[in-house]
Each structure stands twice: as C-alpha cells, then as structure tokens.
Image (cartoon, helix red, strand yellow):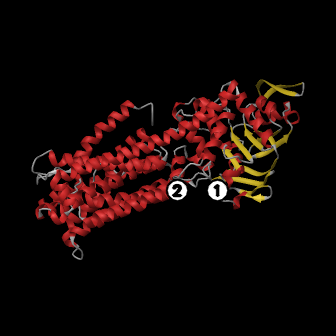
Amino acid sequence: MILDAKKLTFQYGQMRVLHEVDLTIEPGITAIVGPNAAGKSTLMKCLGGILKGDGQVSLDGEDIAQWPTMQTAQRIGYLPQDFAPQAILTVFETILLGRLNTLGWQVSDDDIERVETMLAEMHLEEIGQRRLDQLSGGQAQLVAIAQALVREPEVLLLDEPTSNLDLRRQFEVLSFVREWTRQKEAASVVAIHDLNLAARFADRIVVMSEGQVHSQGVPAAVLTREMIAEVYSVASHVVVEDGETYIHVTGTLPAQ
Amino acid sequence: MNNSADRSQSRNAVAYRSLSRHRLGIVAIAIVVLLAAVGIDLVTGPANLSWGDLLTAVLSPANADPVHRTIVWSFRLPSALMAIVVGASLGIAGAQMQTILNNPLASPFTLGVSASASFGAALVLVFGSAIAWLPVAWMVPISAFAFALLSAMLIYSLGQMRGGATESIIVGGVALHFLFSAGVAFLQFIAADDALHAIVFWIFGTLEGATWQNTAIVAAVFVIAMVLLLRDAWQLTSLRLGDQHARSLGIDVGRIRLRTLVLVSVVTATAVCFTGAIGFVGLVAPHAARTLVGEDQRYFAPVSALIGAIVVSLAAVVSKVLVPGTTFPIGIVTAALGAPFLAAIALRARRTYW
C-alpha cells in the first residue's frame, strides 16, 4: 500500500497553498508538521481526494481523481479538523454513517456488528447511545475517528486529531491510531502541531513550510535545532535520549 | 473482563434495534393520529353530518342521502385530502430546507417561497383581466407556482455567488420574503375591492378551492418527491454532520444540496399555488419530528410529513368551528397554533437541540 503525490499544486484563487509537492506515504504513521498556513490541511485534503489540485495523487498506482467519491472515501479515510455537529444523532448512529457505502434501507446485521466492534475497540461502549450534542470535545473526536475507521480504509488521514484534547486524551488517541496502523499494516497520516507528540508516535515526519516539503525522514533525523529555527523561527534544545527525541522551546527568533 | 465487553457490545446493538422499533412505533402512532384528525375534519362542517352519515356517504355512496353524498364527495373529501397533502408537502419541504441549509429557521415561509407565491397569485388577481387567454382560476396557481419556483432558484443562485454558503442562502431568502411581501402590499394598495378581498383570502391560505383534480396534482408531486428524497435518506442524514464531514464520507455535497432544493421547491410551489400561504407548518413540523425520532432521515422525513398533515388537518377543524357558519382562513389558525408551539419547543429544548 503506497499513497503517492506527484507535483501536487493547489491554489485558492490567487493564493498558492501547495507548490509541486512530491510525497510518498508508506505503511506506518507519518506526521505532517509545520507552522500555521504551511499547507498541512490543504495537503491532507488533496491526499484524501477532497480537493483536486494540479498534479497527481495515486494509491497503489491508481490515480484517485478517476475514482467515484464514494470509492475514495472508502479506501482513504480522511477526517477533517473540527467535529462539533449539532445533529440529533446518537454516537452509534454517527459511527454507522461511516459505512455509508454499504448502508441499505434496512441496516444489515453486519453493519451493526462492525459498529459494535468499533465501539468496543475504542472503549466507547458507555457512550454508544449518547447524543452527539452531549459529548465532550474529546469524546466527539474519538467518535469521528471511529467513524473514519469503521469503513476499514487502507489509508487514514487525520487533520489535527488532538487539537481539542487534554494530555491524556491526546496520548490515548495517538496510541490507538498507532495500534490500529500496526495491526492493519495500514498507513496513517497525522497533521499535528505538537512536535514532541509527533516525535513519539510517528515513524516518519514530513515538515511543511510555505507550501513545500521542507524535509522528511525519521524523527531523530528531521527534528533538529536548525530545522526548528528555520521553519518555526524559535530557538530550542533538542535532546535525544534512549532513542526518543525531546524538544524544548527556549525562545523566539526573528522571523525569516 | 471479556465477559463485560461482550455484554456491552450487545447492549449497544440491542439499544439501536430497540430505538429503531420505537421510532417505527412513533410512525405508526402518527398515522393513527392523522387518520383520527382527518375523520374529525370530515365530520366537521356547517351541514352537521353525523359519523353515521359520513361513513355511509364514504363507504356506500349508493345508499347515502344524495345531499350528503354531494357534500362529502364534492367538498369535504377533496378539502380533507388537500389538507393532508399540503400539510405533508410543507412538512417535508421545511424538514429538508432545514437539513440542507443546516439552519433551524429555514422553511418555505421564512425563505420567502410562500411570499413570492402570494405575489404571483396577487399579480394575476389584480391584472388577471389583462391576460385573457386562460381563465383566472388557472392563471392564479400557475403564476404562484412560477414565482415560488423562481424565488427558490434565486435564493440558490444568491447562495452560489457566495460559494454556496448556507448563511447567504438564508439571508437571501429573508430578503426575498420582504421584497415579495412589499410587492404584495403594493398590489393590495392598487387593487380594486374584489381583487383586494381575493388577495387577502389567498395570503391567509384556504382549502376551499380544493378539487379532486388539484388535490391529485399536489399528491402526485408530493409522492414522487418523497420517494426521491427517501432514496437519499442516508446522505441527507450525513449532511447534518457538517459539509466537511459529509464530503469526507464521499458525498457530493453541492449536488445533493441542489437536487434537494429543486425537489422541495417544486413540492412547496405546488402545495402553496392551490391553497395559498399556509404558514408555520413547514417550520414547526420538522422541529416536532426531530424531538420525536431524531434525524435519521428514514424516520425524520416521513414523520415531518405526517406531523405537517396532522397540523393542517387539525387547523382545518379549528378553522371550521371557530366562527360558526363561516370558514376562518386556515393560515391564521396554523400561525396562531404554530407560533406558541415553536416558542415552547425553543424554550424547553434550547440545550437539547440546535
């Protein structure tokens, strides 16, 4: 399973957000990091087939632009940033909608069973019958991830899945994603701000800056003091201990 | 540990299945209530028919008193059936406008579709004699239909100019509502007395013009639209998760929004062109349906239609008994019943939805 972007360019009106991005996503967790407005979200949307720019995105050699949107959604589970819907739907019903592709007028036992399994795997059984508007931000986030996973995608794209979560929930969500990714031998792409979380959970890191790939590779190779100074304009100490990379921000630098 | 996990898993599936049965039960109850409301509607009227007279006239017309037969078959049945199909049309139109625009205040009335239909009707009522090639009785609904459809398309294009943002569709609709209301007021100002009376009656809405023919037209349009909407039930349900999310599920959001808007515009235009602007039904029915069955469209859409039908049928009864001897305009009744009902829902359930 390989998700491949070639010369991906995207602009909103006159504003170019992505510029000839070449990127290969392999099984495992890839974290996409970079400052605000670096093009992370747009890149995620292009990879998920939500936005169509110039260039090509292909999954195992097949150009995803040629697929019907339902097929793209089935094979590449893209999860947008914010999820705070006001719909009068239960958690169970919401996750069920993730199986839109197979849902018939009568909900099949198979679909119900898969939702059940998903609830159990993500420890959401307790809130299965709760309504969406009664969930905390963290719970809603988990429900959204469950909805993306229940259609059993080959690639999972999560746009800032941890931004609304407390420390413990951030850790839990990313642990779950890592476990799922390893178990299914799938690929997960996570756009994330927190470099320490990225270092801890990602197999590879892609640094985006001004619509282009600045650098990519294993965390220890990419997350350097120099990169952080150049891309984020902050001063930092980067410590590598027992194979783990830790970043301490010590101050700001003049913007470049 | 494993045992409790097994129990919890089945617990959610069991709860989901029982929720589905509960909702089916509500659909059944709504059908029974509707039948009762229609029965009361049929038996109510100035001719003082008894239930026995009514049943005889409906079930074995050959044995019925010819006067009763005429009253029931020429007046009561068409207007009772019209109450059902108009109510159902407004209910489903309001429900889907609220769904695709993601706004609890969307309805045929608030988005100006009813006002523009009124304008179309008033235009013919005032200048009707100038257009001699068709009888006014036909020109009124045709013009009302055309204007209703035109305004719906206008609202949509206004929204498209701003990239399809639902907020601009709502604001555009409210603007159209005021624009066409002003137009109707102007026509009233210049109208002769008899035309003025006809306009006022039309604006309030009335079931008195119901015939088998126009009832059948409204019914046919409603049924076709309902079938098409139910085919999209899951996609429409998903739309309520937000555009971004719906898109991530593989839904072509723009296309389903346009398709649904066209469908509900035709449904609304057809309903209001024969009966006038019966307000508040399209706003209230979906809110009530939402509290009863949630937003799974397989239940939400039919229950919105059923409640719309119930509300208009009951309003028809009230309009007949309110002032003995005359039929009060039904639009006044629906507005008078609907407004406090809506206020009550809004105050009671602010936290629970929208």
Mark 1 closeness class: few <14, some 14–19, many ≥20 residues within 10 Å: some
Location of mark 2 (residue): B256
Image coordinates for residue B260, horizontal then vertical, percent: 47, 56
Circle 1 sits in a helix, a strand or a loop, which is it? helix
User: Which residue is drawn at the image coordinates 37% and 41% (left, top)?
Assistant: B288
C-alpha gap between disc 1 and disc 2: 13 Å
For residue A69, which numbered disc appears in the image? 1
Q: Amino acid at mark 2?
A: Ile
Q: Residue furthest left?
A: B325
Q: Name the quadrant of the N terminus of chain B.
A: top right
Residue type at mark 1: give it. Thr
Tell me where residue B192 sits by quadrant.
Answer: bottom left
Tell me: residue B140, above or below residue B49: below
Give percent across and percent down for residue B27: 40, 46
Subunit that carries the residue with mark 2: B
Q: Position of residue B313 (x, y in %)?
A: 26, 50
